[in-house]
Amino acid sequence: MFRRRRRREQPEPVVEQEPAPPVRESGPWDADEPHPDNDRIDLGGLRLPHNPDFDVRLASVRDQHVGVVVLYDESSLQLQALAAPRSMDLWDEIRTKIAGQAGHLQEQEGPFGTELSGEMRVDGGSRPARYIGIDGPRWFLLAVISGKAAVDDATAEAFHEFIKDVVVVRGDEPMAREEPIPLRRPNDPSRQETAERSRFNPYKRGPEISEIR
């Protein structure tokens, strides 16, 4: 007597899922990568941590906001986000340029890698300063710490934590290399708002700027 052999059931195919991208411990963050959903000030190209102890101001060139100045404890932090090529980093090149223009500076290691430290030229004298560069995907963030925070670790740490929670919004539009990523006032969709004019030069003294209220 012949018995029909039972057909062996085929196992369900295993679908391999793409592993989730690792979440870094801290920023600055790219807007398209996973990052903490913290309370931030939306300035368009930059989203900044909301800290009531900091006085945050916009800097503009002609009719375009191009940078941010943060004031805290006899110190200032200047931030400027620039467009960068997809295939290369900018900090090595920009660091060399700053060292040739900003006075007596030396390289040192900081929380964000190699930075420049020394004296910043100001009208009639100098001011202690640190230049920090951070390369991101298609953007570069320049941070200049000057004043007390450039030499005082406790004050500097407050700025470090601020930088680590910054989000850079590069956008998809084509931009020239080192072109400033435009900013805007909070809750204002226009990036071309007419503002108080001042020249923003991160290599020199901070500009006159319009205050965010």
Image (tube, rainbow, N blue to C red):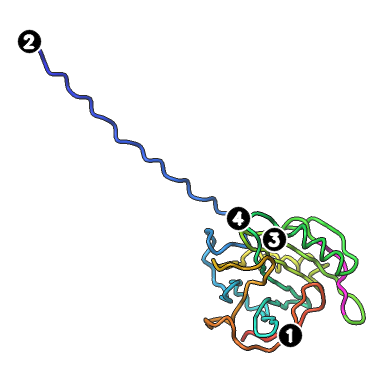
Quadrant of the image occupied by residue 28? bottom right
Q: Amino acid at mark 1?
A: Ser
User: Disc 4, disc 1: CB below 8 Å?
Assistant: no
Q: Amino acid at mark 4?
A: Glu
Label 3, secondary structure: give it: strand
Going by the image, does 150 lie left or right of 190?
Answer: right
Residue at point 73% right, 68% down?
143
Q: Amino acid at mark 2?
A: Met
Residue at point 62% right, 88% down?
194
**Residue pushed farthest left?**
1
Circle number at residue 1:
2
- Label 4 belongs to which residue? 25
- Label 1 belongs to which residue? 198
Q: Amino acid at mark 3?
A: Ile
| Range of residues picked out in magenta | 116-122
Quadrant of the image occupied by residue 41? bottom right
Horizontal and vertical percent position of residue 31:
55, 64
Horizontal and vertical percent position of residue 200:
74, 78
